[in-house]
Image (spheres, rainbow, N blue to C red):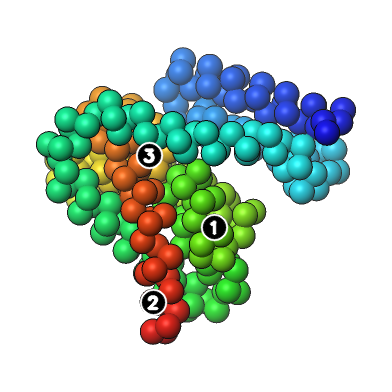
Amino acid sequence: MITAWGAFYLLWTILCYFIAKKFFMRTQKIYFSPIIIVPIFSIALILIMHHQFQDYYHYTQYLVAMLGPITVAFAIPVFRYRKMIRQYFKVLILSSGMAMLVGIFSSWALATMFDFEEIVKNSLLARSISIPFALILTEKVGGSISLIPLFTVITGLVGMLFGDLILLWMRFKNRISYGTAFGNGAHAMGIARARQRHELEGVIASLSMIISGIIMVLFAPIIVAMIKIWF
């Protein structure tokens, strides 16, 4: 049941999103991206109101519930760009598969090195895919429904902010490679940055994110179980 605070926080989140989106579309500046502005404004409001994050999450759970239909909607671009998928099938599958393995093993190794708790370690495993896929993976790997979105957003934000510098440092110019890098490394935020750079990069990034998410959901639980047995 929506209370007065619930309605307020729900409208606040939606309003912040549209304002940030308007500024982002007008300026094309990364720091006006909704994924950055909305959390900052929301955290500031929670602190001012002396509320807890759990309260905000409870009031805005209706937005979180939309992630299920959004996950199903990912099938639309897959169908729309099926010709491009066939054309770059090997690149998309190989890059997405390698990104999954690197993401899982690097997260597990670093979490083990710093002796993180089991639930934190499990939550880090899904950080390199978009939130809808990550939430599906949560139950399968024993992660936290609160931590996985946080780690996912941080990963995407870092990839979006520093992706250009890394690709520039590599001195390898190929829009297909750039698109797969942004899609696999920074998921939704990487797609936003890739689209700013070039239309082809944006399309490839979108397909890479979807394919990596599907691969992660299907095979990550098996790989994680094997890692836990071996190590």
How packed is label 1: few (under 14 Cα within 10 Å), some, or many (20 or more)? many
Residue placed under numbered mark 3 in the picture: 190
Question: Residue 106: percent from the left, percent from the top?
Answer: 38, 68
Quarter assignment of residue 60: top right
- Which mark, by number, is residue 138? 1
Task: Determine the secondary structure under disc 2.
Answer: helix
Q: Is residue 228 above or below residue 23?
A: below
Q: Nearer the viewer, mark 2 or mark 3?
A: 2
- Amino acid residing under circle 3: Gly
Q: Quadrant of the N terminus?
A: top right
How packed is label 3: few (under 14 Cα within 10 Å), some, or many (20 or more)? many
Question: Residue 101: percent from the left, percent from the top?
Answer: 32, 63
How packed is label 2: few (under 14 Cα within 10 Å), some, or many (20 or more)? few
- Amino acid residing under circle 2: Met
- Which mark, by number, is residue 226? 2
Q: Nearer the viewer, mark 1 or mark 3?
A: 1
Quarter assignment of residue 68: top right
Residue 201 placement, left or right of 125? left
Sequence-wise, the earlier of marks 2 and 3 is: 3
Residue at x 51%, y 51% (from the top left corner):
136
